[in-house]
Amino acid sequence: MRRQDQIAEARKLLAHIDNRTTALADGVYCNPVTDYTCPRQAARERALFFEDASLNIGLSALLPRPGDWMTHDYAGVPILLVRRDDGSLAAFLNVCRHRGARIVEGSGSRAHSFSCPYHGWTYGLDGSLIARPEEASFPAIDRTTHGMRELPAVEKGGMIWVGTRPGVALDIDRELAGLGDDLASYNLESYHHYETRTLRREMNWKLAVDTFCETYHLSYLHHDTISPLFYNNRATFDGFGRNHRMIAARRTIDELRGRPESEWDVYAHTAIVYVLFPNTVFIFQRDHVESWHIFPGDRPDRCSMYVSLYIPEPVASDSAKRHWDNNFNLLMATVELQDFPTCEGMQKGFLSGAQDSIVFGRNEPALQHFHRSVTTALADEEPRLAAQ
């Protein structure tokens, strides 16, 4: 976040603390429980947001060196990402052009080519088909037209985006809707990937996003974990198209009082949460970055997600490793033992008939913004679907 914006947001947070207020929406918003339970809506969301869209994959640090590669299947599309010899990033469908087998699994480094385990067709890092056993058996199948099918991929500001269909147009500046400069100020290109963990839970994918969209619950749900670190229900909010930024105040923010604003270290006293529509959450916390990428499961009440920790310098000592392990373990314990069990209980409650809608208060503007964005995106797509 740009320096002038940091100062402005810190002023707002201090005023909220003084006045016992927070960022407010214009009114209360009632969200239908069918948003979390309806199979038809779940299918529309999967098609629009995940199967024919652009995905944020994470930071460039996931693939730092030529020959690094990883597979990505969370959106229901088999994707292979690779750092080519010239340092550029490429994405392909992880499908052999011979019989459709998956070419690779997992992730790796120092690759010079990829060989399909089924019949040994081999592809270069540029996707070209460079070798196949029994070449003479395929006289009419030109190797130059049977490379891996490429997907559009863009690196910008230290982040990776991939289109889930060949030919999908990626206009990242348009999608960020003014957040580009904000995100660029963090110098994400300089971060290092520490660890990624995968979670699967019995709840709608939007409930997982909701977890990161308000601070109203901190002193209740997290009274023995992170509540002592943060002010409850004190946050700023700004929308950027369908994306948003929310900033929570650490209790140490009071240390800024009485100091010249030129000396304020705003990052040290806040947690800055970005939701990049529809399913990506970035959290900037003092000395590290957390990212959450959340995907729908095979039913409305299932989701999968991967959470990554990025750090400013490579781990060079046992004490540094303990520090980052402790950070990651606290994060995971908080969501695994408190947030997500609560959300799974909500998911079951939606089917009980207790309510037709849930309530987002005026003090939950980020929640309102996110769900209005989902509703608007689906409505905007309805005429095209009806014409098919």
Image (tube, grey):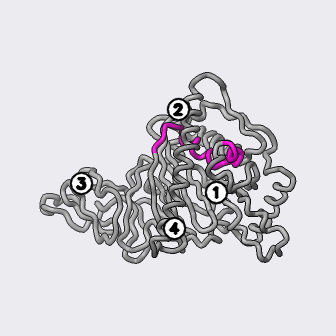
Could you tell me how far apart the alpha carbons at marks 1 and 2 are, in whole angstroms? 28 Å
**What amino acid does circle 1 point to?**
Tyr
Could you tell me how far apart the alpha carbons at marks 3 and 2 are, in whole angstroms? 35 Å
Identity of the residue drawn at 48% across and 56% down: 163
Q: Of the residues under marks 2 and 4, which one precedes in the sequence?
A: 2
Q: Is 26 left or right of 230, judged from the image as shown?
A: right
Q: Residue at label 1?
A: 274
Q: Residue furthest top?
A: 353
In this view, the mark in front (1 or 3) = 1
Q: Of the residues under marks 3 and 2, which one precedes in the sequence?
A: 2
Residue 88, placed above or below residue 349: below
Q: Residue at label 4?
A: 155
Q: Residue at label 3?
A: 98
Q: Of the residues under marks 4 and 3, which one precedes in the sequence?
A: 3
In this view, the mark in front (3 or 2) = 2
Could you tell me how far apart the alpha carbons at marks 4 and 3 are, in whole angstroms? 30 Å
For the N terminus, the quadrant is bottom right
Residue 147, placed above or below residue 4: above
Mark 3 neighbour density, 10 Å: few (under 14) some (14–19) many (20 or more):
some
**What amino acid does circle 4 point to?**
Glu
In this view, the mark in front (1 or 2) = 1
**What amino acid does circle 2 point to?**
Arg
Q: Of the residues under marks 1 and 3, which one precedes in the sequence?
A: 3
Identity of the residue drawn at 52% across and 46% down: 336
> Secondary structure under badge 4?
strand
Q: Residue at label 2?
A: 40
Q: Nearer the viewer, residue 12 or 280?
A: 12
